Image: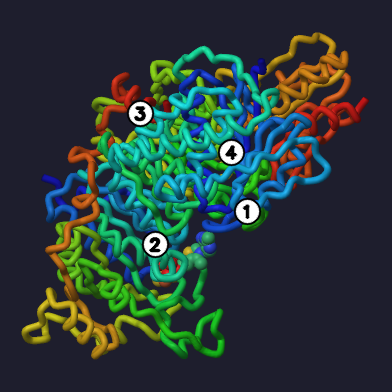
Amino acid sequence: MATFKDFRNSVKPNWCPGCGDFSVQAAIQRAAANVGLEPENLAVISGIGCSGRISGYINSYGFHGIHGRSLPIAQGVKMANRDLTVIASGGDGDGFAIGMGHTIHAIRRNVDVTYIVMDNQIYGLTKGQTSPRSATGFKTKSTPEGSIEQAIAPMEMALTAGATFVAQSFSTDLKDLTALIEAGINHKGFSLINVFSPCVTYNKVNTYDWFKENLTKLSDIEGYDPNNREEAMQVLMKHDGLVTGLIYQNTERPSYQELLKGYSEKPLVDAELKLDQEHFDKLAAEFM
Amino acid sequence: MINQLSWKVGGQQGEGIESTGEIFSIALNRLGYYLYGYRHFSSRIKGGHTNNKIRVSTTQVRSISDDLDILVAFDQETVDLNYKELHDRGIIIADAKFNPKQPEDTNASLYAVPFTDLATELGTSLMKNMVAVGATCAVLDLDINVFREVVQEIFGKKGQQVVDKNMEAVKAGFDYMKENLAEDAVMHLEKADGKKRLFMIGNDAIALGAVAAGCRFMAAYPITPASEIMEYLIKALPPLGGAVIQTEDEIAAVTMAIGANYGGVRAITASAGPGLSLKMEAIGLSGITEQPLVIVDTQRGGPSTGLPTKQEQSDLMQMIYGTHGEIPKIVLAPSTVQEAFYDTAEAFNLAEEYQCPVIVLSDLQLSLGKQTVEPLDPNKVEIRRGKLQTGELPEIENKGYFKRYEVTEDGVSPRVIPGMKNGIHHVTGVEHDETGKPSESAANRNAQMDKRMRKIENIKFDTPVYKNAPHDEADLLIVGFNSTRGAIEEAIGRLENDGLKVNHAHIRLIHPFPADEMLSLVKSAKKVAVVENNATGQLANILKMNVGHAEKVKKVTKYDGNPFLPHEIYSRCKELF
Ligand SMILES: Cc1ncc(C[n+]2csc(CCOP(=O)(O)OP(=O)(O)O)c2C)c(N)n1
Ligand code: SF4
């Protein structure tokens, strides 16, 4: 059995000291070990950004693609090999700006992939421009007068898009985050985990202290029921989205692969490529 | 006796024009005739003039004909728009219902046949197209029973009565026409050989080629004229355990296909120009990460939405150069439906052998033109997976990575897929070292770039150029790609009749360009005419760039949305002398 150490590799992350992404990396490594994976059975697919580098910092199969497209790549990998555990990950710009179309559709498609967003409310890699998660009034290099746009509410958005697993966490809560990633991996269908992962270099507003002050743990709300979509929406609205924990899970809706007619039970990658003559003749006959 | 003829049916889109053409051509295909059908349609669903021109011949034909023998018209617009194609002895068969007017400046004769009325008498005006088929039958002196089998297949599900009624409609049209047709107007078509052959569009062949090559996953976004590929695979893949996902856009389609290929499945995506433009960044990703990828581009009139339902060949430059940075890439351009089948299948082998994107370039005329095809042989489809590792891999010490990008002599590195023990490595679109770890060192950059580009220097492809070059010293070399092949062949026949020595080269491997082979052909010709459906002469420019001899190379272009007709190529080439 692999331990979290087996998911470590020899590459030294180029993140700034104190960057929230370190804990996300550690949480993925622990969760992977806790659910009993071997490194070769995990594929981490990431986008572009500081956060996108994460696939290179985990000892597993890793694919660092193009900006905003980690989700379609991840879904392709999962379709090819349903026995693999596939994690997609990237920043809030990656997932909620350039990749937003894919995020919404991955949610409603419900392919069995776990998507972890490292949400720092800013563009880190490109050195500090506004992100769709930046609050109105937030001053950045590209919004010197303060952002005049409305921030995206990814959790509410996921709920309305028909998500079957929606969770949020804070990167210092390593234990909770690890547990949520495990739950996401075990969930049959698409799981979205938004992680507040502070950028210590460019975001001087949404700092560790800021989050500590403003976040509410769902576990502290008495009787909170993550199977109730309406309640989930209410709690998000009440707290302006600043809650952590499992917000919503629907265990009844089957995943895309389970619903897909004809889709091979064994991984597609093991399918016989050669078509037998009889099958070919049947196909050809339709054109005669 | 004639050995070929051209028949066209036209009317408003949504009026059953397509099914009239379908029934007519399937029946004749089964008699052993070679058919070539080309649909003219607008991007509207209902309304707007549409027509289907079908050529029938006792030998293989791959082009629309210059003229027309029979025009079946469901409205006056069809008559007005198309009668000029009719030759002197041509016939217009028009629905009496719209009081068709005989155009003045033609010797073709018009027969008003009560398509709608006869059909209505038999039960429903919907059968007017069957009446039209029957009337055609009389002109061709065919036994109407040749249609019985097809009618049975199409309407059988609706019950025997519907089948019988439709056959009655065919007979009504036949009888009416027989009675009214001038004796000498009958066109006696030579008997065909009765051999069973396929009748399909290029897109069917592309899709079938993919299935035969072991493709089990497709991700795509609908677009004319590529959608049929997806629609076919959505039926053909599930029985094989595979799947098709209609994605949210083309970027998702191509990246999902990249993910699936990385995952180890043979996966495809298909689109037309607008979609290919969106896929460009991802094609670069496939290039630098050395993931196999098969992409189909069915060209249509551009730019932007351009002429979405019309023929054009203007994506050539985009397919070769349209990604930022430099990658190894292979571009194939089949010119017949047969080639579309085999080349698509082979694209999967090349993609895995050279670990790079392979574009199967088609055009609207090839993708949607329906033609008779000699039987396809799945045993000719090889499955070669290149350096894909199977079996157990040696253990790697100290958590090192597998050398997925090992610098090798041929530039191709061993490939592993996720799930394989001891195969862990990193994949990134960032420049990387042999194990996939990001690296910006100049030496590494050179080593990796050189290795990638080296891969396709000597690619093996069976027939990079289709040649019909009987002359050691030719007056003219005609060069083309994709669907222009049939029209060029016919034009050459006429040019040769005029005493010119003409060679023909149809380029099937567009990139890497078969420069040596083309150079010797160009050298041995006095003039070179490059025939293509675009405004700037893209293939001519590529030819000049690769083989020189710019003074010889003449551009024969057409970009009005319509395919070349043989006589156009003939006269444009004549002008060169
Ligand atoms: C197509 C494209 N556009 C723009 C960029 C430049 N770019 C790289 S990362 C990034 C945004 C980074 O922000 P985020 O996704 O939030 O990740 P972070 O760096 O904050 O972790 C941008 C705009 C790119 N790489 N590709
Ligand atoms: S710039 Fe910000 S997001 Fe990027 S590594 Fe540094 S702290 Fe992390």
Q: Residue furthest left?
A: A223
The chosen color scheme is rainbow
Q: What amino acid type should be assigned to the residue bearing mark 2?
A: His
Q: Are marks 1 and 2 on the same chain?
A: no
Q: Judge depth for marks 3 and 4 and give the one in front.
A: 3
The secondary element bearing badge 3 is classed as: helix
Quadrant where the N terminus of chain B sits is top right
Identify the disc placed on residue B446: 4
Q: CA distance from mark 1 to mark 2?
A: 52 Å
- Residue in the image at 26% along x and 72% along y: A171
- Residue in the image at 42% along x and 50% along y: B124
Q: What amino acid type should be assigned to the residue bearing mark 1?
A: Phe
Identify the disc placed on residue A283: 3
Mark 3 chain: A
| Mark 3 neighbour density, 10 Å: few (under 14) some (14–19) many (20 or more) | some
Report if the CB atoms under discs 2 and 4 are less than 8 Å apart. Answer: no
The residue wearing badge 2 is A102
Ranked by sequence position, the earlier of labels 1 and 4 is: 1
- Residue in the image at 39% along x and 79% along y: A152
Report if the CB atoms under discs 1 and 4 are less than 8 Å apart. Answer: no
Ranked by sequence position, the earlier of labels 2 and 3 is: 2
Mark 2 chain: A
In x, y percent, where is residue A208? 30, 81
Q: Judge depth for marks 1 and 2 and give the one in front.
A: 1
The secondary element bearing badge 2 is classed as: helix
The secondary element bearing badge 4 is classed as: helix
Whether residue B518 sits left or right of residue B453 in the image: it is: right
Q: Nearer the viewer, residue B335 or B263?
A: B335
